[in-house]
Amino acid sequence: MTGRVDTTALRRLLAEATPGEWFMSYSAVCSAALSAARHAAEDLLTDDSPDSAWDALPSDLVLRVPIAAGDTPTAQGANDARLAAALRNAALALLDEVDEQRAQDEHRNACVVCGDVLLPAPPPHCEGCDLDAPWFTWRTPEPEQP
């Protein structure tokens, strides 16, 4: 992937993905919210419940990774599962940080006198103000108005 990350599109994908915190369970990544719902449904069943009732329990599975044997993932599968869960759990905070940093960058690149975007070449301030020097809010205080 090259270029600017589209945080709006990523937020949309995040909203459409399986909800809640994810965790690794053997060769699967599961949703904590769906797991809680599954356990609540299991608590309603008894030893006398038919197999079909147990088979009808909601799934908490989000994704599976390659297995070595039984439910044991391959080494790479375990790495991938940990990564998927960690990224899902950190995604919202990471997107918030990116958006916050972008907002700060936009603020830093604006003239504090008139708000116009600073020019990349001399003069270092915008064309609309008559200051002789740049005024970046992150380097110097805002100039006093006469």
Image: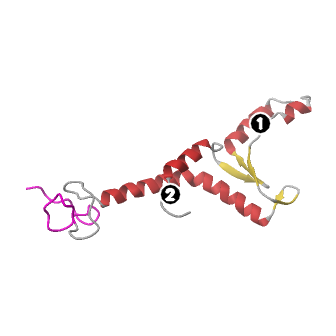
Magenta region: 125-146
| Apparent side of residue 90 relative to residue 97 in the rendered image (left or right) | right
Marks 1 and 2: which is nearer the front?
A: 2
Residue 58 numbered tag: 1
Percent position of residue 43, x then y: 79, 33
Q: Is residue 47 visible?
A: no
Residue 5 numbered tag: 2
Q: Would you place residue 102 above or below residue 30 in this image? A: below
Percent position of residue 21, x then y: 64, 47
- Counting every numbered tag in the picture gives 2
Say what secondary structure mark 2 lies in.
loop
Task: Name which quarter of the figure residue 48 lies in.
Answer: top right
Identify the amino acid type marked 1.
Answer: Pro
Identify the amino acid type marked 2.
Answer: Val
Say what secondary structure mark 1 lies in.
loop
Task: Name which quarter of the figure residue 49 lies in.
Answer: top right
- Residue at 86% of width from left, 34% of height from top? 54
- Residue at 46% of width from left, 56% of height from top? 98
Task: State the residue in front, 1 or 52.
Answer: 1
First in sequence, mark 1 or 2: give its number.
2
| Apparent side of residue 82 relative to residue 54 in the rendered image (left or right) | left
Query: Mark 1, residues whose alpha carbon is within 10 Å: few (<14), some, or many (≥20)?
Result: some
Q: Residue furthest left?
A: 146
Label the magenta part by its dominant secondary structure.
loop
The residues tagged by marks 1 and 2 sit, at their Cα atoms, a distance apart of 35 Å
Mark 1–mark 2 CB contact (< 8 Å): no
| Apparent side of residue 70 relative to residue 60 in the rendered image (left or right) | right
Q: Name the image quarter holding the N terminus.
A: bottom right
Task: State the residue in front, 133 or 52.
Answer: 133
- Residue at 69% of width from left, 51% of height from top? 23
Percent position of residue 35, x then y: 73, 41
